[in-house]
Amino acid sequence: MKLFSKERPEIPIVNHLKEDGTEWTIKEKLWLGLSVSEYKKQFIRNPVNWLMVFIFAIGVPLIIGRYIFGLGWVTHASNDYPWGLFLGFGLFGMVPLSASGFMLGTTVELFGRKDFHSIERLALLNGLLGYFFAVLFLEVDLGMWWRLPYPMFVSLGPAAVLFLVAWHVATYLSVQIAEVLPSFFEWIGWLKGKRAIRKWVLGLTVAGIILSTLHQGALGALFCYAPGKVHPLWLSVNFQWLHFFCSSIFAGLSMVIIASTLIKNFMAWRCDDEFLDNLDYVTIGMAKGASLAMITYLCIKIVAVAHDQEWSYLLTGWGTYYFLELGIAVVLPMCMFAVGIRKHYVTLIRFGAFIAAFGIIWNRLNTSLICFNWQMYQDIPHWKEVWITITLYSLYFLTYRFIVYRMPIVYEWKGER
Amino acid sequence: MNKLLNRRNFLKGGLATTAAAAVLKNSDTQAAGHFDGYPDSMGVLVDLTRCVGCRSCEAACNKEQQLPEPAKPYDDFSVFDEMHHGQKRRTDETRYTVVNRYDVPEIDHPLFRKIQCNHCAEPACLTSCFVNAYTKTPEGAVIYNPKVCVGCRNCMIACPFYIPTFKFSHAFTPRIMKCIFCYDTRLKDGKAPACVEACPQEALTFGKRTEVLEMGKQRIRMTPGKYVNHVYGEHEVGGTAWMYLSSVPFDKVGLDTHLPNEPIIYSVKDFLAMVPMVLTIWPGLFVGFHLLATRKDKIKELEDAKNKKNDEKEEQV
Amino acid sequence: MRTRKKILRTALALAVGTIFIAPSQIWCMDASDAPESVTIDLMAELYGPVEFDHLMHTDVASCQDCHHQTTGGEVTDPSCARCHRGTDEGDSVGCSECHVTDRFNATNVKALEDPQLYHFDKPGLKGAYHINCIGCHKTVDGPTGCQDCHTMTDAGEKMFSTGKHAPAKGTSSSGHH
């Protein structure tokens, strides 16, 4: 794209009107204003696309196989380990990393911090896509995937934590669609729709906070059903929902830092000056928020150990692993954030964000797989399961890129808004 | 929208229940949410000192529930040496019950223990299910409805006894497979389950749960030194319909002795109680934050408007 | 019927007792009263009948080991002796007199709810046989395998998926997952 954006002044598209005053059609917008041959050219040039083709070439048949031969064909999910990577990574990992939507929605719309405005849309999109793909992961994992709406409309079990998760993720997904729609309406040029939604912003944002608090916490509370199975250091019946909620705050913020870093480095042609100029400031701001959440998280982690009288576990091998997790996943990025904020080393913050996001996934995998059945044997995911997980994540990446390439996420629409 | 209202009502109910539980905690009245089990629930007492590991129960279960043909005949006792990931045999989609052998060094003969669903009074599978696929019948059975199950397998996570199993091998007709106390074919007509009927040793004693519990206690009392002084399942996870008597500590025969005495759902109640709080307090709190955070802008707006008016007035004057 | 019989018997005992100088004699059976062999076909559906060599067993065990107090004689178990001390031999000593064949049917289970019932944990017939036989065989190294005592019928082989009905190798579900 860099190539074409230098050669042709009207690319990338930021306006409804072309240079000559005619309107871009939706089709042209979808092709990024390029001809088919130009589009092919830029597709082939990008090595990431080749990697994607390789992943999909194996991953898609595997996914089809899962729907023909059953879960047993692609996973090691067993009666002892009913949940594998699809949920461990796809649901328990993706959802906290997508807490960004409500975090920045709250910052900008509710607290009126207009200085974070330039990152808000990216955060909202990051949230929407994360949730959408978490549901997609769920659809691969559910035995009877065609019954997804059952907990909503057919047979209700309202006392179950998963019922809350289902309802909240579903409603929150709708809220997030509503929050991202203005960008879409700008892009297709339906301003009436956009303005209608803008009126609801405060309500949507508050709904977002409520639903996020509850379902981020509920994902943690799901493990309270297995007090004898999850290692006590990773499960505190009283604090589990707080741990999950609190860690989702810095997870979401870290994920936005990661996304913005990738966009800044590999998609600068798409960003406008406001986004690029503000990015360092915004990144430092988000790091501040994240490090506050991290110190809170560390405190309640220790409180939980004290509350459950689990000190003796800390001296076992599991205790060492616990310290390792907290050290690498939380303390290290927290220190990196702290130094980065103080000395304005934004690069350090960006590295810290990568570590923090990895750390959250690690924590969720620890809770759902590695420290699950800790008194039994260790389940190692099937290679097909790993590959399908990577395939779905690649699809997430592609969708993400597809949208950021086109819609006004990291740039402002120049035309009528 | 209608469903949303249902949900709201449920949450209101939850709040009311929490309040009621707090108020009624020390009174005799039973607050909603506490369940001691159906009074006429049936039960089975498994006496490990009687079991000889003949596997008749496994065979009878297989035929009664029309499960797939086993890999080895039921009179083949080499199955007791089978290990998977260092674990003894367990229930799966082809078998609802399994007998395992335990060699306890302190005694000169092996012990055998049958595994099946213990049919909890307040089952974790049931309380964790978000589509109500499980039912605890007044007869004591925990049964499953494959017609509404989504296949999320939360019940398998929740079950403290690792009982529910899933047909991972089926893409089009997966379902949970678990012992249902022979509810459809026997229990609902007052008959004992097939395994109990098949047991030559009467290691399995069927009757009203209260009766068989009494029998267990009597056996402990009448034969001092023979049994560990505990009926496993009397209190475990809120009480189970199937209970065990053993001559050796229960962890030596593969039973989890660290289970709480409260139903599994109690571990989740902290979170469930928090839900109505968030739903009622958060909106006001955060709208308040919003007003506070944006009050300077508002004040400025008002002042600007005032100044403008004053300016206009001055101009007029 | 029973009482009349008892009275008659007591009268007889008194009469005989006076003749044979044993004033406090309790009526009790001994090995010579026993049948030589008993056919047990309780589980006829799955297993062939057991030809129980009663005579042989009278050499290795006492009557009370199996028949409790019903054959008469001194009751040694202190907790049984509280009621059964010094009772006569029963009218019938057959196991099925007391041990029901279908212990867990609805009627029998319901009957246990009677709070006055003392022996409320009495094994059924099948349980009584097996607990007693195998329990003893274990201590004296007698046979304990199912088919050591009774051979399996075709229906039994079907239920146990063995013999003619054994699973074909490699075709059946292994139950891995």
Image: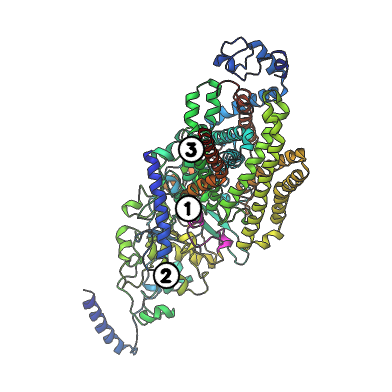
Which of discs 3 and 1 lies nearer the camera? The answer is 1
Asked if residue B256 is among those painted magenta in the image, a careful observer would answer yes
Q: In the structure shown, which secondary structural element does the residue marked by tag 1 occupy?
A: helix
Instruction: Read off the residue under disc 3.
Output: A170
For badge 3, the amino acid type reads Ala
Residue appearing at x 66%, y 23% in the figure: A53
Q: Residue at x 47, y 43 (%)?
A: B176
Residue behind mark 2: C66
Left or right: residue A219 versus residue B36 is: right
Task: Pinpoint the chain carrying mark 2.
Answer: C
Q: Secondary structure at mark 3?
A: helix
Relative height, residue B5 to residue B216 (above, below): above
Percent coordinates x, y for residue A302 in the rendering: 66, 58
Q: Are marks 1 and 2 on the same chain?
A: no
Per the image, the residue denoted by label 1 is: B277
**Nearest-to-viewer mark from 3 and 2:** 3
Judge whether residue B92 can be spotted in this image: no
Q: Which residues are magenta?
A: B250-277
Q: Residues within 10 Å of mark 3 (few under 14, many from 20)?
A: some
Output the chain of dot 3. A
Which amino acid is tagged 1? Answer: Met
**Against A393, is A214 above or below?**
below
Between tags 1 and 2, which lies in front? Answer: 1
Q: Are marks 3 and 2 on the same chain?
A: no
- Please say whether residue A408 is visible from this viewpoint: yes
Cα distance, mark 3 to mark 1?
Answer: 21 Å
